[in-house]
């Protein structure tokens, strides 16, 4: 089935505290959304991308899309491929060093359809807006946080492969390093789940389209889309996540991402 991708980028980024919405905060001169798009475009299966932007930032998101599609496509096996990005404003020059051009498997991503829609008050509302904007062609839907801006193409590939193999819902997850306690309202521990069975989940999350649509028809209120699908009683498969798919939430996370990019 054709794969469509929703990138949710409509949050304000209150914990980051920048003066622009988080997806437009620059990292090595490129907005987080631009990095996220380059990772997504490295996945050859994705044929359609809907970016969900804050109302008032749709035109800006559109120009980030045009910048991303003008960049050489990076082979998804070669990692994030965004070590020396050019600025979206620097339309002159490819913005890549010659050593990296050899990793590109395609120049431009002209066969990928991209559009931008305005998001909603909560993340789930933004996903719902993205779902409504997908074309009829799409049978498999990926949902990705722009804030996980360094997620590599290989992670998209892995999630897509599991959905194409028949899983109704797939999430990338990493083992948890801390012991996790469940607490009550008074701050007292209620229980300690067996850590070996816990996973910290990331995006992109992948779904058979009808499964995700049925989930959102009930409610869009959850911190991740797999949570909605779980309520339907559908099985959700966890595949290996990637440390590069960290979510930029705080100023410290932005520094971490900058360090990763610097190599
Ligand atoms: N998001 C969205 N629409 C919203 C809220 C969040 O599209 N109404 C997106 C964000 O842009 C982000 C992803 O969902 O890419 C994950 O959300 P989060 O990291 O919480 O981002 P923000 O909500 O922007 O940040 P904060 O919670 O600190 O305000
Ligand atoms: Mg938020």
Image (spheres, rainbow, N blue to C red):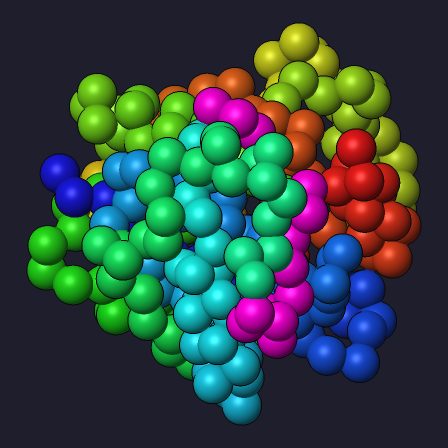
Q: Quadrant of residue 104?
A: top left
Q: Is residue 210 above or below residue 175?
A: below
Question: Where, quadrant-wise, is the N terminus in this rendering?
Answer: top left
Is residue 89 inside the magenta stretch? yes
- Residue at left offset 40%, top offset 59%: 69
Eyeballing the image, is 249 above or below 175? below
Residue furthest to the bottom in view is 56
Q: Quadrant of the C terminus?
A: top right
Evaluate whether residue 91 shows in this view: yes
Looking at the image, residue 209 sits to the left or right of residue 195; the answer is left
Give x and y (percent) for residue 202: 57, 37
Q: Position of residue 74 (x, y in %)?
A: 46, 38
Q: Residue at x 73, y 51 (%)?
A: 248
Front residue of 92/28: it is: 92
**Image location of residue 144, percent across then percent down:** 47, 50
Q: Which residues are magenta?
A: 77-92
Name the foreground residue: 140 vs 219: 140
On screen, residue 245 versus residue 14, left or right, reads left
Image position of 19 with respect to 129: above or below = below
Residue sitting at 33 percent across and 53 percent down?
109
Left or right of 134, for residue 125: right
Q: Can I make out residue 149 in this image?
A: no
Helix, strand or loop for the magenta stretch, by majority = loop
Magenta region includes residue 73: no
- In this picture, is 103 found above or below 60? above
| Residue 20 or residue 230, whichever sits in front | 20
| Residue drawn at (48%, 76%) of the image | 63
Displayed quadrant of residue 192? top right
Tell me where residue 181 appears, x and y as whole percent: 80, 27
Label count reads 0
- Closer to the camera, 89 or 150? 89
């Amino acid at each position: 089935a054709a794969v469509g991708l929703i990138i949710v980028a409509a949050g304000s980024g209150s914990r980051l505290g920048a003066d622009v919405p988080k997806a437009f905060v620059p990292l090595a001169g490129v907005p987080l959304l631009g990095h996220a798009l380059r990772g997504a475009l490295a996945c050859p299966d994705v044929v359609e991308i809907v970016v969900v932007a804050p109302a008032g930032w749709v035109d800006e998101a559109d120009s980030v899309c045009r910048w991303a599609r003008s960049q050489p496509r990076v082979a998804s096996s070669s990692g994030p491929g965004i070590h020396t990005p050019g600025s979206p404003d620097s339309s002159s020059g490819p913005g890549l060093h010659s050593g990296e051009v050899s990793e590109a498997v395609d120049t431009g991503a002209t066969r990928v359809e991209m559009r931008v829609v305005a998001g909603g008050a909560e993340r789930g509302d933004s996903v719902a807006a993205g779902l409504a904007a997908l074309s009829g062609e799409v049978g498999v839907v990926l949902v990705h946080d722009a804030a996980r801006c360094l997620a590599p193409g290989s992670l998209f590939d892995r999630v897509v492969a599991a959905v194409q193999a028949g899983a109704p819902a797939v999430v990338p997850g990493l083992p948890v390093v801390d012991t996790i306690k469940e607490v009550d309202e008074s701050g007292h521990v209620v229980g300690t789940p067996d850590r070996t069975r816990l996973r910290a989940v990331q995006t992109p999350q992948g779904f058979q389209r009808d499964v995700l649509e049925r989930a959102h028809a009930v409610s869009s209120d959850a911190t991740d889309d797999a949570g909605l699908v779980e309520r339907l009683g559908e099985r959700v498969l966890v595949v290996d996540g990637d440390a590069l798919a960290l979510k930029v939430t705080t100023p410290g996370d932005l520094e971490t991402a900058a360090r990763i990019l610097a190599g």
